[in-house]
Amino acid sequence: MKLEGVHHVTAITSDAQLNLDFYVGVLGLRLVKKTVNQDNPGVYHLFYSDQEASAGSDITFFEYPGLPRGRAGAGMVHTVVWRVGSTDSIAFWRERLGDLGHPVEEDGEGLAFHDPEGLRHLLVVSTAPDTPLSATHPEIPPEHALQGFEGVRAYSVAPDTSETLLAEGLGFERVGDVWEARGDQRGGTYAYDSPPEEPGLQGSGTVHHVAWASKSEELESWRTRVMETGASPTPMIDRFYFNAVYFPEPSGVLFELSSLGPGFTVDEPLDSLGENLSLPPDYEHLRAQIEPNLRPLVMPSAGRDS
Ligand code: ZN
């Protein structure tokens, strides 16, 4: 068994419209699902991805209106790393982000920036053989579009304590100081940095969890396997779009293992994904209560034809 890289990254926003304007309007991702938090159906859960709504390019946000700004600390993911096609693409994003008022900084060969609530992103030129996962956007030439996740970076005070789980429980391979989960189709990386002194604070602009992709038929076996290395996974939970198992890895970062199927077209056609509020069957009977309490979202104009 091998995990197929990152399935999705889930983070927190206090303002769904601000979030949509950035991830669709600026970064050029596609809103592929507008639904509610299945553990708290009074708030939005927004999913952005490539044109095909693929795992591997899917960043999702729980909205908690008015939640104070958080900050990444020990035991939290602090940077989401995305692939782009070339150094020309890095130059394109340096200019685009700058023009749109988002400060950028060089980080090694990559380009780092923050979303409007402080979540840090890093663009790197892809060296992976994986199929690029891109969305279309009228202002972004296809060759410069984001191509899906390279991986995530987290803060840990004791990364060695995670080694058994990562290597034996999850089959990650260590390349230098970076761990990689690589399956038949895709790979994704996981790396640690020393944490800042200030403790982390879960709030808007922070990552809630990172999910790794499992072949659907292997999820239960993965659950057993991580348990054998000492992790305490939840039972398998049906998230309607995929099945999921959650557990904190020893550094404190919340991991999820998610099945690759059935995916986001289970309740909407691919062409109109994200246009309407989707409610999983267990919540459909609550639509009349849920929908009026959610602030309507306006698609950013530049992202409207995507
Ligand atoms: Zn998740």
Image: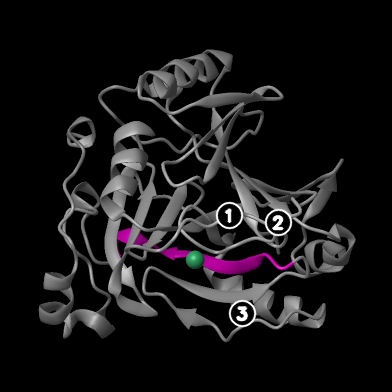
> Label 3 vs label 1: CA separation?
33 Å
- Residue that badge 2 annotates: 198
Could you tell whether 192 is left or right of 68 in the image?
Answer: right
Q: Nearer the viewer, mark 2 or mark 3?
A: 2
Q: Which residues are magenta?
A: 252-266
Colouring scheme, one of rainbow, by chain, secondary structure, one colour: one colour
Q: Residues within 10 Å of mark 2 (few under 14, many from 20)?
A: few
Quarter of the view holding residue 100: top left
The one of 118 and 257 positioned closer to us in this rendering: 118
Residue 124 vertical position relative to residue 260 in the rendered view, above or below:
above
The one of 230 and 265 positioned closer to us in this rendering: 230
Which kind of residue does numbered mark 1 sit on?
A: Arg
Q: Residues within 10 Å of mark 1 (few under 14, many from 20)?
A: many
Q: Quadrant of the C terminus?
A: top left
Q: Earlier in the sequence, mark 2 or mark 3?
A: 2
Q: Secondary structure at mark 1?
A: loop
Residue 255 on image: x %, y % = 63, 67
- Residue that badge 3 annotates: 220
**Residue 270 belongs to the span the image colors magenta:** no
C-beta proximity under 8 Å, tags 2 and 3: no
Q: Nearer the viewer, mark 2 or mark 1?
A: 2
Quarter of the view holding residue 168: bottom right
Q: Earlier in the sequence, mark 2 or mark 1?
A: 1
Q: What secondary structure characterizes most of the magenta part?
A: strand
Q: Nearer the viewer, mark 3 or mark 1?
A: 1
Could you tell whether 174 is left or right of 40 in the image?
Answer: right
- Residue that badge 1 annotates: 71
Residue 214 visible to an observer of this rendering: no
Q: Secondary structure at mark 3?
A: helix
